[in-house]
Image (tube, helix red, strand yellow):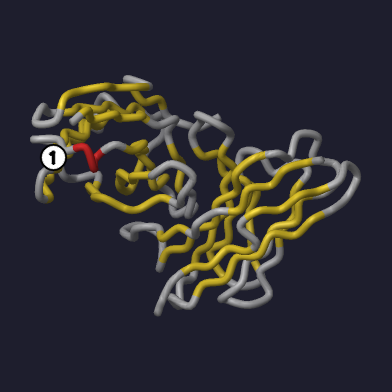
Amino acid sequence: SQQGEEDPQALSIQEGENATMNCSYKTSINNLQWYRQNSGRGLVHLILIRSNEREKHSGRLRVTLDTSKKSSSLLITASRAADTASYFCATDVASNTGKLIFGQGTTLQVKP
Amino acid sequence: DGGITQSPKYLFRKEGQNVTLSCEQNLNHDAMYWYRQDPGQGLRLIYYSQIVNDFQKGDIAEGYSVSREKKESFPLTVTSAQKNPTAFYLCASRGGTGIAEAFFGQGTRLTVV
């Protein structure tokens, strides 16, 4: 399987704390994307980082990408109870295959 | 409203039956995808299509079939050859490959009874 690995699998923090999730992947990529999924729903796109970028910010989200290590991290700062969800990284596989491969996900619980 | 629609939301199948899950998008997207999600797991790619009348197998295509006769539609058939079909199925589309986010439907929960 080309699926990547995410860690931790589950994360529980208090409101106001920061949450960091990591993603590792196996193939060369065009870009890496992060998605959020509320329980039993579809996924919603959060942020995209290109293979030639190292860091990107969007509101309370900060994403880093290290292509030499084939890894990425998602940082959510000043977390809120509403951030409780599952978070997935997805790699846009290079060589124009069109494949979009998802990781196993991190389940985040933010306690009020 | 532009979006991607999956139907039905819940589907029950008897063993040995084929069932077809619908996925329609009005976003004018070229690429469409089908994923399977098991409880507490990530998404696994079943099939994907970059253009009308063309599609490729993903990582777990066995027991599934698709068609892409229209740009807007990418139905997934779960055949009787799929031994463990109970799962949450997600359809997605995106405008192209390279630099494009995916838009997801709300999913179909399939249960074998």
* Relative height, residue A26 to residue B77 (above, below): above
Residue depicted at x 41% and y 77%: B2
Q: Nearer the viewer, residue A54 or A17?
A: A17
* Residue type, mark 1 in image: Arg
Choose top left, top right, bottom left or bottom right for residue A54. Answer: top left
Residue A78 percent across, percent down from the top left: 8, 35
Q: Nearer the viewer, residue A50 or A89?
A: A89
Query: In the visual, does A87 lie left or right of B94?
Result: left
Residue B76 percent across, percent down from the top left: 69, 58
Q: Secondary structure at mark 1?
A: strand
* The C terminus of chain B: image quadrant: top right
* Relative height, residue A73 to residue A95 (above, below): above
Query: In the visual, does B36 lie left or right of A55?
Result: right
Q: Nearer the viewer, residue B70 or B11?
A: B11
Looking at the rendered structure, the number of numbered marks drawn on it comes to 1
Q: Residue furthest front?
A: A112
Query: In the visual, does B26 lie left or right of A19?
Result: right
Residue A77 percent across, percent down from the top left: 10, 35
CA neighbours of label 1 inside 10 A, class few (<14), some (14 to 19), many (20+): some
Residue depicted at x 75% and y 49%: B64
* Relative height, residue A2 to residue B27 (above, below): above
Residue depicted at x 35% and y 29%: A106
Residue identified by numbered label 1: A62
Choose top left, top right, bottom left or bottom right for residue A7. Answer: top left
* The N terminus of chain B: image quadrant: bottom left
* Relative height, residue A95 to residue A68 (above, below): below
Q: Disc 1 is attached to a residue of which chain? A: A
Residue A72 percent across, percent down from the top left: 25, 32
Residue depicted at x 61% and y 53%: B108
